[in-house]
Amino acid sequence: MEPHGRDDPKGPVLHIVVVGFHHKKGCQVEFSYPPLLPDEGHDSNLLPEEWRYLPFLALPDGAHNYQEDTVYFHLPPLSGDMKCVYGVSCYRQIEAKALKVRQADVTRETVQKSVCVLSRVPLYGLLQAKLQLITHAYFEEKDFSQISILKELYDHMNGSLRGSALEGSQVYLGLSPRDLILHFRHKVLILFKLILLEKKVLFYVSPVNRLVGALMTVLSLFPGMIEHGLVDSSHYRPKSSVSEDPSLAESAEEFVSVSVTDIGDTALDLEPAAESLSSGNSAEGDNHLLKPPSRTSPESSESDWETLDPSVLEEKEATEGKDTAADLTDAFESKPGTPITVQPQSGSGQGVVPGLVSGLEEDQYGLPLPLFTKGYLCLPYMALQQHHLLSDVTVRGFVAGATNILFRQQRHLSDAIVDVEEAAVHIQDPELRKILSLTTADLRFADYLVKHVTENRDDVFLDGTGWEGGDEWIRAQFTLYLHSLLSSALQEDNERLLADYGAPFVTAWKISHNYRVWYNNKHPAMAAITPGSVQNSERGKKIGNAMMTTSRSVVQTGKVVGQSVGGALTSAKSAMSSWFSTLAQPAAGPPTEPATEAKP
């Protein structure tokens, strides 16, 4: 993507933008450098049509309730471009009487503005850290006509970030899986599996910085997702443009299997269909998302699922698992001839190469999974003006964040609502809740995480070399979990292996777009991965011990030679990958009862 008005197309930062609240016009762009439109000036309020929601994303709904806030948001690519635009916005407000220069349009007691960075690279935390300092200095000037500091920020960021590799601790700056597990506990694994099914997942909490932090931290558990998996995550059109682009309707029919004619003018006259367990595999399954269901599940059934003792879930699974698995086979059966779009493969590099089928930059295991492609959106923050996307037929699913209560109230538009404040996952569909019920092996894995995070809570980072129970360690555990899940899913007739993850879940996942794309490509490194639950295998134990030993050694060595802890951990992750192909086969044995630590 070329930044408008600049000769150098390779800088990671596209624009620095100031958005303000006008008492008559509402949220509007007040300054952009370089100009958002090549033929306009820096002070133009005009926007590219694809970015019409920019002011409402940068200056979030309800911002007046907070002195400052931070927003992560995604913008669609401009015409002819192929990648998501990553936005970071720092909001502040100041009393009008404190201004040295009070412009004529300042008529209220407070002035609200946001300074934004629009970037081609997903370095959210790093961009935020730099932007917060400049935003503070910009407000300290108490004269918003002083824009030289913003131009300097553009040049500084493009100079300091140019050539930055999307790897290492800088990608995850500000995202803490430790805090996530301390808050959500075993439900983190429910969220992980929910997103694998490509469901419509809405995160809800205020303020925005807490919202986007929780959502992006969950996504950071998916290997390579933030670095390489979000490039197609914001391919949508503003409401006025959807009907004008026939290619979007064609895309919806091909990848969502829902035709516009099926859900057009007659959608609101249809009776609610039986709740489909798949995400867009029949027209009837998606029609019920376009209006409130005539009969929602009893409130008690939802709350019961939230508060059930894990052992109760297992008792139900033992009695119902076989019947459920059999029933779901037909419901989730994917047509063998389902087409997968093959994209051309460009020249490969080392470690990460362009995927032949997914089009994403992939590692040797085919990760990141192509979740956020072909109409499955990732919108860390959604403005109220984007509400229509929840029921847009060209959108087959989403992982989105919102602070406006209207999003939460319309539960029929989402498969799951994640209340971050309460650490609750609300799912109305009882069948989906059954699919996501954690197995004994799942609960053991979740308990393993919770135990290590809580036990090491006070002293693990005192000398800066903590590994076990730390952020990098947690991400490594989820990488192992996904590797083992992928390997187990390839075992067609091994019920014991599939039972570790839940046969109904695996059946549902196998017809998802991300699994079918992954399955239709070859990933030679998967041959070294042993199927079965990580916590059930000797391999899992050896990997855990290897990771601890390797990481501690590398980090301590890094301290001796002056290497940064972040760089040392990056080196440790590279060293750990060499263990995958040398570890022993798992030892078979019956699963143990889940520990009580996994209770909600």
Image (tube, helix red, strand yellow):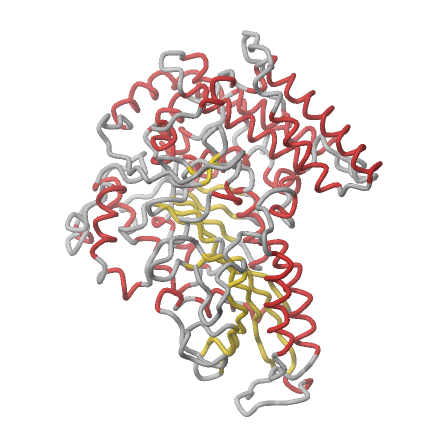
In the rendered view, tell whether residue 226 sits above or below residue 148: above
| Numbered label tally | 0
450 relative position to 536: left or right: right
Measured from the top left, where is residue 334 in percent x and y?
A: 26, 28
Find the residue positioned furthest to the bottom: 104
Find the residue positioned furthest to the top: 588
Quadrant housing residue 568: top right
Q: Nearer the viewer, residue 128 or 22?
A: 128
In the rendered view, tell whether residue 394 sits above or below residue 591: below
At 30% from the left and 63% from the top, the residue drawn is 239
403 relative position to 476: left or right: left
Measured from the top left, where is residue 267 in percent x and y?
A: 19, 51
In which quadrant is the N terminus drawn?
Answer: bottom left
Measured from the top left, where is residue 408 in percent x and y?
A: 43, 54
Measured from the top left, where is residue 292 in percent x and y?
A: 30, 50
At 45% from the left and 78% from the top, the residue drawn is 26
Q: Is residue 304 visible?
A: no
In the rendered view, tell whether residue 426 sits above or below residue 260: above
Q: Is residue 35 visible?
A: yes
584 relative position to 395: left or right: right
At 61% from the left and 89% from the top, the residue drawn is 102
316 relative position to 450: left or right: left
In the rendered view, tell whether residue 385 sits above or below residue 105: above
In which quadrant is the C terminus drawn?
Answer: top right
At 33% from the left and 18% from the top, the residue drawn is 323
Q: Nearer the viewer, residue 384 or 437?
A: 384
Quadrant housing residue 106: bottom right
